[in-house]
Image (cartoon, rainbow, N blue to C red):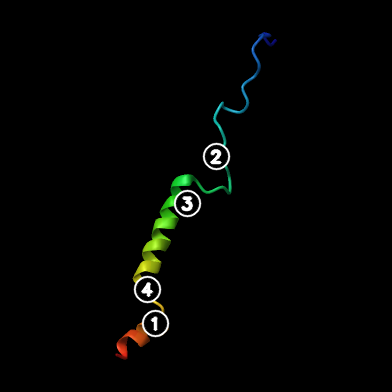
Amino acid sequence: MCAFTDSPEPVGRGLEQPGYGKPSAELLARANRGLTRFLAGHEDPESAADEGET
């Protein structure tokens, strides 16, 4: 026999589900920093060739 209570039943274990398929703000910031660092380290080959022909 079940005891009835006035409180609503907890959904699942009471834990929030992570946003499946949604990147976190920290992940987006890290990816942005990595892309910036990558682009800063690589120059356009045509502009690099122009600078070498002085």
Q: Is 7 drawn above or below residue 38 in the view shown?
A: above
In the image, residue 21 lies at what x, y percent? 58, 49
For mark 3, what is the residue?
Answer: 28
User: What secondary structure is found at the residue carrying circle 2?
Assistant: loop
For mark 1, what is the residue?
Answer: 47
For mark 4, what is the residue?
Answer: 42
| Horizontal arrangement in the rendering, residue 37 relative to residue 11 (left or right) | left
Q: Callout 1, which amino acid?
A: Ser
Which residue sits at x=41%, y=78%? 44
Residue 31 figure quarter: bottom left
Cα separation, mark 2 vs mark 3, equals: 16 Å
Which residue sits at x=64%, y=12%? 7
Residue 40 figure quarter: bottom left
Cα separation, mark 1 vs mark 3, equals: 30 Å
Between tags 3 and 4, which lies in front?
A: 4
For mark 2, what is the residue?
Answer: 18
Of residues 40 and 53, the one drawn nearer to the viewer in this rendering:
53
In the image, residue 36 lies at what x, y percent? 40, 62
Which residue sits at x=39%, y=60%? 34
Q: Callout 4, which amino acid?
A: His
Cα separation, mark 1 vs mark 4, equals: 11 Å
Cα separation, mark 3 vs mark 4, equals: 21 Å
